Amino acid sequence: MMSRRILMLASISAFIAVFAQNLYTPILPQIQQQLQTSHYLVNLSVSLYTVALAVMQIVYGPLADAKGRRTVILPAIVVYTGASFGCAYAGSIEMLLLCRFFQGIGAAAIPVVAAAVIGDLYEGRERARGMATYQLFLTLALSMGPLVGGMVGGWSGYSGIFLLVTVMGIAMLLANLFWLPETKPAAGTASPFRLSSLVFIAVKHRSSATVLIGFTQYLAVYVFTVFLPQIAAHRYGLGPEQTGGLFLLLSLLPAVSVRLGVRLQSRMGNERSLLFTNMLNVLSIFLFAFTANLSLPLLIAGLCLFGFTMGLTMPVPATLLTEYFPKDRATAVGVYNLVRYIGMAAGPIIGVPLYLGGNVPLLFGAIAAIYGVSVWLGMLIIRRRTSAPGGRNREHGL
């Protein structure tokens, strides 16, 4: 019962941190007008949060492994909450940019520590279930943020949005202060922080397969996020409300399939499940590429298939990383999150030239091909590292 409560606390805390990433994007034009600033600077307020959130992953990860989970997460929540309050009363774009940057710095610790706590608490199939819950909350946060932000911002402006986040931050701080124990394993110590440790996780270890696939998967997710509204509006004449319904559908479907993903992981094993479920996700993008332009029902069906197969993949990455690196769980998750956020940023950049002229098959076909190649390379990495002398013995530390 206690571990279940801590799992929900960690997952909800991660949800609140990521929830603020794109929360107010629906009212960016109003913020631009109210603060009398440029389109570039108001969009920069979104980017600064994401950059801070991404880069600080590899700072907080080693800190949480060295100093403990509570020692890192509690001050970070204070920074997050204070910066959120500052955003609510920012009277200029300069103050908003500064507060958003510190908001991202505070938020960055929360998903890393949350995943490490779940890895500390659970083993085996229970760990997979816990990570499935954690990943589901993160996915819901990314998709629900703009929906809730649009509703709240519509009647209270951006100040109301950030006051909501401030209240959520205070509640998160109190909950973690009273209910989050220190879960860092007492036996053994984390490896000293070195840049080579991060490179080992991202490139040299078998975990590099997980990191590579995570990069391309979230590249694909953000291609859907950015280009789905354009396809819905230009091809089928859907308005913002109908497009919001598509995103709501996309966010809810992983909740349907994530438990099935846990069962597949238990039956197939972690690494085989990683490759199998992500290949299903790749195939769903290929189908979407060649059916989305045919009719709206086929677009919705393809979107549903993508969301469903996305849910199947969710339990695997964090489970693998926390098992590979029991002494450096937060560091490994931090590297994975950093690369994943880079993938999010790369999605729109790669997608723009592919979508010239509204070429849906080219855009999603190319993204599916990139994603598919990463899964194939991941398979080669896992096989090579498994068969290499001492390969299995190196799983348990940096």
Image (spheres, rainbow, N blue to C red):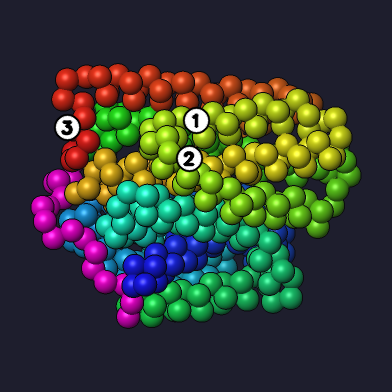
Disc 2 from disc 1: Cα separation: 9 Å
Q: Where does label 2 land, which residue? A: 264
Residue identifier under label 1: 276
Earlier in the chain: of badge 1 and badge 3, it is 1
Q: Is residue 101 left or right of residue 249?
A: left
| Distance Cα–Cα, label 1 vs label 3 | 24 Å
Position above or below: 105 against 358: below
Q: State left or right for residue 190 relative to residue 58.
A: left
Q: Which residues are magenta?
A: 178-196
Describe the element under mark 3 as helix, strand or loop: helix
- The residue lying toward the viewer, choosing from 2 and 85, is 2
Q: Which residue type does callout 1 highlight? A: Phe
Q: Which mark is residue 125?
A: none
- How would you classify the magenta stretch by its main secondary structure? loop
Q: Which mark is residue 393?
A: 3
In the image shown, does 181 or 259 lie closer to the viewer? 259
Which type of secondary structure does the marked residue at label 1 adopt?
Answer: helix
- Whether residue 154 is visible here, answered yes or no, is yes
Residue type (three-letter) at the residue carrying disc 2: Leu
Q: Residue at x 51, y 79 (%)?
A: 167
Q: Residue at x 46, y 52 (%)?
A: 132
Above or below, comparing residue 338 to residue 44 in the picture: above
Q: Amino acid at mark 3?
A: Asn
Question: Which structural element holds mark 2?
Answer: helix
Is residue 186 a member of the stretch shown in magenta?
yes
Distance (Cα) linking label 2 and label 3 = 25 Å
Which of discs 2 and 3 lies nearer the camera? The answer is: 2
